[in-house]
Image (cartoon, coloured by chain):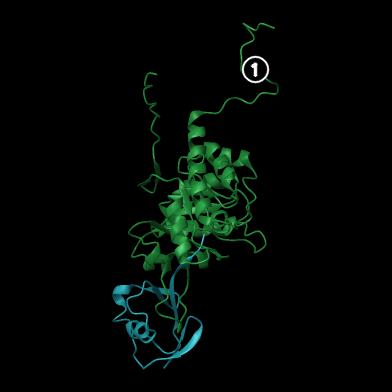
Chain colours: A green, B cyan
Amino acid sequence: MTDTPEVQLPEDKPLEIAGRVYQSRLLVGTGKYRDMMETGHAIEASGAEIVTVAVRRTNLGQNPDEPNLLDVISPESYTILPNTAGCYTAKDAVRTCKLARELLDGHDLVKLEVLGEEKTLYPNMTETLVAAEELIKDGFKVMVYCSDDPLLAKRLEDMGCVAIMPLGAPIGSGLGIQNRYNIKLIVENASVPVLVDAGVGTASDATIAMELGCDGVLMNTAIAQAKDPIKMAHAMRLAIEAGREAYLAGRMPKKMYASASSPIDGTFF
Amino acid sequence: MQVEVNGDAMELPDGATVEVLIESLALTGKRLAVEVNEDIVPRSRHPEFTLNPGDRVEVVHAIGGG
């Protein structure tokens, strides 16, 4: 047997958000894990470099030696992306971002999400637009959770958001990418990164998002609520890579009827 | 004097600074951010920022979230 030369895969250009380059296209949250050790292990297995956190009141008078999330997920090793989860008004979201910037020593990359109602956690886009404008004016680099409306996505980009993050399905629902055509339209129109944020339930959902041409996927529950979060974190890492490569490779066209893979010529029957 | 910290009333000596408040909460050196009456008080100003009776203080930190 002769040695076959090693196949050289063309190199992909890495994800770039607000001037910083990332090798991983998977962004992960830190909520809903059993404990901080599991959080740390799952994030390591995911290969993610950008990790979201929430900002909440410090428990007063309780165990002062309680481990701090930022000791496990340190800002020296990860890009910390504070979110505005739980905010239903632009005012609360802006306030949360300012506290996050102070907490992270001036780090100004934020995930803006302004929610509309508890049942669906669907984004309130009018408040989101107001908050985005104010935050950008104040020097924040805004990655914005939004509806999958292509026109609003473009508007957020034109305002100066550094990444557009439409939902694939409601937060924590695990329903997968419900409107592929809208996600594709948003990707086609955008010149900043587009990441599906919310809705992924399992690895194939993440792959679909990437095959649609998304620059990345942000997820939390799909990993944290899996039976084995660490294994799922690694599955998601592979799923993102598979979807990205399939997108770059360019899929075959879909056809209505069969087309034989083996030639008809040379049959002996 | 009485101030409100994270929604609860708290008694502090008159003229206490944010630094004194953080000390009395045993949170010195922790990663946190402080807001007084909805304005950020930068860490560098904690030693000099004097609290007034009735001030509403928020002390926040990072927790798990998506």
- At x 50%, y 51%, the residue is A233
Location of residue A265 in the rendering, given as x and y in whole percent from the top left corner: 62, 6
Q: Is A184 situated left or right of B52 in this image?
A: right
Q: Is A259 situated left or right of A51 in this image?
A: right
Image quadrant where residue A269 sits: top right
Location of residue B64 in the rendering, given as x and y in whole percent from the top left corner: 49, 65
- Residue A63, above or below A34: below
Looking at the image, which residue sits at the far front? A1
How many other residues sit within 10 Å of disc 1, few (<14), some (14-19) or many (≥20)?
A: few
Location of residue A8 in the rendering, given as x and y in whole percent from the top left corner: 38, 27
- Give the residue type at disc 1: Ala
- Residue B7, above or below A69: below
Secondary element type, mark 1: loop
Near-viewer residue (A207 or A38): A38
User: Can residue A82 be seen here?
Assistant: no
- At x 64%, y 9%, the residue is A264
User: Can residue A15 be seen here?
Assistant: yes
Q: Is B2 situated left or right of A19 in this image?
A: right
Q: Quadrant of the N terminus of chain A?
A: top left
- Residue A117, above or below B48: above
Near-viewer residue (A112 or A80): A80
Near-viewer residue (A201 or B6): A201
Which residue corresponds to mark 1?
A: A260
- At x 62%, y 47%, the residue is A176
Q: Chain of mark 1?
A: A
